[in-house]
Amino acid sequence: NMKITQLSDELVGKSKTIESLKQENGKLSNDMVLLRDESSEAIDILEKDKKHVIQESEISKESYLEDIMKKEGVITKIEEEKQILKIACDERIATITNDHKTKLDILDNSRGQMMEILKSEEENLNKTNQK
């Protein structure tokens, strides 16, 4: 009888242990479901954030590319204007140089004529003085 009581007590203890383990297992199972749901929600949020960041990055990239193209267009226009100005300056320098050379030639001719006139006047003066 004692053995039956002992076995009965042991059975009650093990039954309580089983019940306790079932409750703990149920709690752990609930925690696991909760953790899975929270993880899925966190993953969804991260995926949405990732998608948003990629979209923003694409928008910024397109904006930067547009800015670069505009600036390259401005650079090209400025380089073309610079070339036009260089040609105009070169032509202006050539014109001024030719004008200057022409004026110098005129001055040299005038000087030569004046020297001839002076020489002629001196000769006339010398002839007059010798008489």
Image (tube, rainbow, N blue to C red):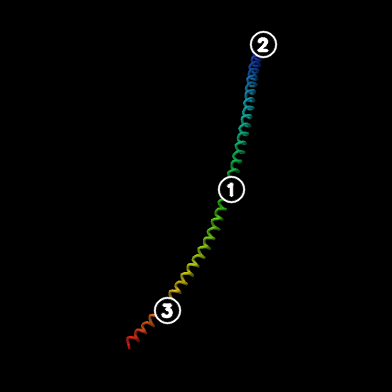
Q: Position of residue 84 (x, y in %)?
A: 54, 60
**Observer-nearest of 86 and 37:** 86
Report the amino acid beneath label 1: Glu
* Residues tagged 3 and 2 counted as in contact (Cβ below 8 A): no
Name the residue carrying label 1: 66
The quadrant holding residue 114 is: bottom left
At a point 56% along the width and 55% down the height, the residue shown is 77
Check disc 1: other Cα within 10 Å, few if <14, some if 14-19, many if 20+: few
Q: Position of residue 111 (x, y in %)?
A: 41, 76
- Give the SS element for disc 2: loop
Check disc 2: other Cα within 10 Å, few if <14, some if 14-19, many if 20+: few
Q: Earlier along the polypeptide chain: callout 1 or callout 2?
A: 2
Name the residue carrying label 2: 1
Report the amino acid beneath label 3: Gln
Report the amino acid beneath label 2: Asn
Q: Give the CA distance from mark 1 to mark 3.
A: 70 Å
- Mark identifier at residue 122: none
At a point 67% along the width and 13% down the height, the residue shown is 4
Q: Position of residue 32 (x, y in %)?
A: 63, 27
At a point 44% along the width and 72% down the height, the residue shown is 104
